[in-house]
Image (cartoon, rainbow, N blue to C red):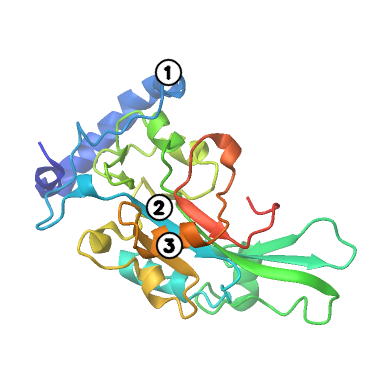
Amino acid sequence: MDHQDEEKKPKAENALRRNFLRAVGVGAACAGAWVSKTLPAKSLADETPIPDIPGYDWRKHKWAFGVDATRCIGCLRCVEACKAENGVARDAHHFRTWVERYVYLQGDDQAHVDSQSEPGNIAASGSEQAFRFDNRYQNAPVEKAFFVPKLCNHCTHPACVQVCPTGATYQTKDGVVLIDHSYCIGCQYCVQACPYGAREFNHAMGVTDKCTWCYHRITKGLQPACVEVCPVEARVFGDRNDPESPISRFIKNNRVSVLKPYTGNAPNVFYVGIDKEVS
């Protein structure tokens, strides 16, 4: 049965199945998660094919993302576009993508880091929508400052896929990591396994949520919403199988790095202009 058939099932039936799996599956998930950690990351695309998309052959693409931190101005249009495009409640306290600010003051060895997702910043501004990075450093002796957009890294060896006990989190042939919410039992093993903090638990739905690189858009030849709205082209997206794609040129023409390379997840979000303290 493919995912299209699954999505046609009544929501009540899916809810019953999810509750049943949560009741009898989570107990066994501990053992399953332990075993999965000992195995190499495995793409479930062979067993769990994505829905047929007219004109799109997902086996021919290898998607990747680029972020140029030297360009980002912290305007948060990407965050707003992401929420609007993906139906995330605008007052929800979780983000599929977010922006962090790194500020180095004279004499400090470590950066001061904050983002729009921090409760203190939200409270100070009144709401997440009204938030803009405050002026607390306006009169401070700032030595260096920059913004770092973050999102799901869609890793080549995703830890989240390894620990999922039901196969709800899976990796497709084109390099994208997705979640089938009809199979998610809300155990949150994937949330704990992700070293990048890119997954959030949606309490209203009882499932895990994250960035999908706007999969519904890129499979139709469009850009992710956050890339499309960025006014300074700090976000880059494309197909690594195409040597002339924006992301291929971005990687070729810049000295890129990835977050936490020591984890072995092999992220597919490539950064330019980040400090070694960015993680």
Observer able to see residue 148: yes
Q: Residue at x 40, y 52 (%)?
A: 210
Q: Is residue 22 left or right of residue 201?
A: left
User: Tag 1: Cα neighbours inside 10 Å, few (<14), some, or many (≥20)?
Assistant: few
Q: Secondary structure at mark 2?
A: loop
Q: Are marks 3 and 1 in contact (CB under 8 Å)?
A: no
Specify which label sits upstream in the sequence, 1 or 2.
1
Point out the image quarter for the N terminus: top left
Mark found first going from the N terminus, 3 or 1: 1
Q: How far, Cα to Cα, is label 1 from label 2?
A: 24 Å
Q: Is residue 91 visible?
A: no
At mark 3, the secondary structure is: helix
Image quadrant where residue 110 sits: bottom right
Q: CA distance from mark 3 to mark 1?
A: 39 Å
Say which amino acid is labelled 1.
Val
Query: Residue 249 has which mark?
Result: 3
Q: Are discs 3 and 2 less than 8 Å apart at CB?
A: no
Between 126 and 153, the one lying in front of the other is: 153
Q: Amino acid at mark 3?
A: Arg
Closer to the N terminus: mark 3 or mark 2? 2
Measured from the top left, where is residue 5 in percent x and y? 9, 44
Q: Which residue is mark 2?
A: 210
The residue drawn where x is 34% and y is 62% is 244
Q: CA separation, marks 3 and 2?
A: 27 Å
Q: Residue flagged by tag 2: what amino acid is it?
A: Lys
- Tell me if residue 254 comes above or below residue 76 in the rendering: above
Q: Which mark is residue 35?
A: 1
Viewer-side residue, 217 vs 269: 269
Residue 173 quadrant? top left
